[in-house]
Image (cartoon, helix red, strand yellow):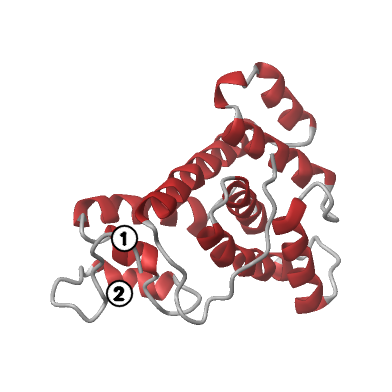
Amino acid sequence: MSWTRAIAPDSPEAPALYAAIASASSRGAVSNLWQTLAIDAPGLDRVFAQFDALMGEPAPLTTSQAELIALVVSATNGCGYCVAHHGPRLARALRDDGSRKLAGDVGALALARDVARDYREANLLAQDRVLLDYAVALTCEPDERKLEDIERMREYGFGDAAIVRATEVAAFYNAINRMVCALGVTLEAGVEPWEYGAQR
């Protein structure tokens, strides 16, 4: 599960928060990441609260835009665990996004897999490509960001609130990817690994 002690959902030590975590999960389960972080219960509370605030209702971004960022940042950082979790979440969000013309579940899944491999080659809207350029630049070269990055986002229709939310989501997944990799969190049984590319 991880290189450190984790707290299983059936353990007497299991925090009450596990019920909310399971209900927010598409699998109805507490993932290995949350079980690993539960050894620091106050930390788990804060990290999950931030996850829920950013991804539960990502407006003014769409759910698919927030999941695009989560997936591409995770691929850029080489975090296969998060890619495997957010690939299917992106496919569901794309399927449910009425502004996109996709061939149902199959089209949404194919596009999500293309994004995981290399978003630059995927059939994305220009606005989403610019959003991901921003997230990858922030991931790879945070100290080189300039006003021009913000102005380019504005040119493609992102208001300041959306830019701030995109920055928060990208920064959050940079932190989560590092937690997963540093603690050796492994994929849960039944969660399929996804192919992905280092999107630098």
Horizontal relation, residue 31 to residue 73: left or right = left
Left or right, 60 with reference to 37: right
Q: Which residue is mark 1?
A: 3
Residue 81, horizontal then vertical, whole percent: 51, 62
Residue 124 higher or lower than 160, as above or below = below
Furthest residue to the left? 12
Q: Amino acid at mark 1?
A: Trp
Q: Residue at x 77, y 65 (%)?
A: 98
Q: Is residue 190 above or below residue 65?
A: below
Q: Earlier in the sequence, mark 1 or mark 2?
A: 1
Q: Quadrant of residue 17?
A: bottom left
**Picture coordinates of residue 135, whole percent (x, y):** 63, 39
In the depicted view, which residue is nearer to us: 172 or 4? 4
Residue at 21% x, 54% y: name it.
40
Q: Residue at x 78, y 44 (%)?
A: 129
What percent of the width, then of the height, locates residue 128? 75, 46
Question: Which is more foreground, mark 1 or mark 2?
Answer: 1
* Few, some or many residues within 10 Å of mark 2 (<14, 14–19, 20+): some
Could you tell me how far apart the alpha carbons at marks 1 and 2 are, in whole angstroms? 24 Å
| Number of numbered labels in the structure image | 2
What secondary structure is found at the residue carrying circle 2?
helix
Q: Residue tagged by mark 2?
A: 19
Q: Quadrant of the C terminus?
A: top right
| Label 1, residues with CA under 10 Å away: few <14, some 14-19, many ≥20 | few
